[in-house]
Image: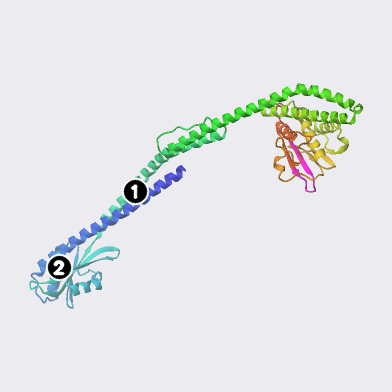
Amino acid sequence: MRTRLVVAFVLVTLITAVTATALAYRESRNAVLERAQNAIRTDFRNRVGEVAADLDIPPDRDTLARFSTSVAHGLGDAVVVARYHDLTATSDSHADRTRITPELRTAVRTTGRMRFQRVEWHGEPFLVVGASVAFDTGRTSDLDVFTIAPLRAEEEDIAVLLETVREGLIPVVLLAAALALLAARTVLRPVRDLGLATRMLAAGELSARVAVKGRDELAQLAETFNHTAESLQTSVAELRAQEERARRFVADVSHELRTPLAAMTMVSTVLDEDADQLPPDSALAARTVSTEIAQLTRLVQDLIEISRFDAKTVSLEAAETDLAELVRSTLTRRGWTGQVHTDLSDGVRARVDRRRIDVVVANLVGNALRHGGQPVAVVLRTTDHEITMEVTDRGPGLPSEALPHVFDRFFKADTARSRSEGSGLGSAIALENAQLHGGTITAANRPGGGAVFTLRLPGNPPQDIP
């Protein structure tokens, strides 16, 4: 922007200077030529009047020659040409009379008044002045006199003037550039400060402010920015406080529920064991209570886990692990071995937190078994830079509108069901655990039908993340 301002400022100055110079040059040139023309015409008129008083009419060739020479004596370098009918004489026998144009001769002869014309001959300017000689009787004779005066000196003066003006443009342009730099600095400094403050604000430095100087538009912009930043800082502080209170509330409630839930779980276990000895209605009620308590327990555990992620209090307990063995262990402990087809590359080892990767695998496989269609497959592969684990099913797949929200908290793809076995937090917790290892999880639909969830871990995941 600085360059554009300087260039624009210099261009405007240059155009203005050139225009003013051109106008001044034109007026000066016209004034110089006009003054020279007036002087030549006056001298020519006076000289012709003095010499013509002693001229005998009609003149012969010698008389006409003496007349032209006498007139030329008072006109410097000018050449005088006298013409009387068919006789023509010049003060310089070597002079070229073609510089007197037919138009000028005709104008002098028909009007009887003094006429002049500027002409160029061999690249040099001349002023040609013509007049018809009048005598004391007031009548106009047939004697026409012309003078050819060089304008070389005037043109040289004009050339010197033009050169001076041209040389004067350089310091004007340099001065304009210096002023443009100063003006650009004055204008751009607040803009630069404002840009820096904006970047700091975007980076999370909500205390960023700019100094307000003056009362111009830039000062008003800076003041508006400061007000906006202050309002944003206040709003963010309030939102953070509300978020912190919400996290603390969830964590406190979850922890407070753990003790009564543990007691309720013990009671529900006893009820499950004795359900067969109870009347049918009582047995159904006991099993229902047991199921709901188990689901509530999972929800509380998930809430506690997600609150730890929000509070950033989780950490990795990483150890060198055989991922194929870990996947098999996860499926065995949950009784899914017979329901899941596995294609696990042996020798895939990485430093991971076994418990957290177990949670990820259990969530992905459990969702495929509950919501997808058989068969469910788990494929483990590795490259030089990445470890991938794909969990696929042959179910109906995920609705296209649900794909962007699969890992949102409390999101359930089947909105027609008001309740389900899951808490809606499992996928979000799985993604958090993957990201804790420096990886990620993506969801998509298979071309042949069904959903595919892909866990990607770096070849060398971080050993410890506080």
| The residue stretch that appears in magenta | 444-456
Q: Residue at x 22, y 60 (%)?
A: 34
Q: Which quadrant of the view contains residue 250?
A: top right
| Residue 315 screen position, x and y as percent | 71, 26
Q: Residues within 10 Å of mark 2 (few under 14, many from 20)?
A: many
Mark 2 or 1, nearer chain start: 2
Looking at the picture, tell me which residue is in the foreground, 457 or 277: 277
326 lies above or below 48: above
| Residue 154 screen position, x and y as percent | 24, 57
- Reply yes or no: does residue 445 show up in magenta: yes
| Residue 85 screen position, x and y as percent | 17, 78
Left or right of 141? Residue 211 is right
Q: Secondary structure at mark 1?
A: helix
* Three-letter residue code for mark 2: Thr
The answer to whether residue 379 is seen in the rendering is no
Left or right of 442? Residue 84 is left
The answer to whether residue 296 is seen in the rendering is yes
Q: Residues within 10 Å of mark 1 (few under 14, many from 20)?
A: some
Q: Secondary structure at mark 2?
A: helix
Q: Residue at x 63, y 26 (%)?
A: 245
Q: In the drawing, what numbered circle is on residue 169?
A: 1
Looking at the picture, tell me which residue is in the foreground, 2 or 103: 2
Main SS, magenta region, reads strand
Q: Residue at x 60, y 27 (%)?
A: 241
How is the model colour-coded? rainbow
Residue that numbered label 2 is attached to: 69
| Residue 60 screen position, x and y as percent | 12, 76
Q: CA distance from mark 2 to mark 1?
A: 47 Å
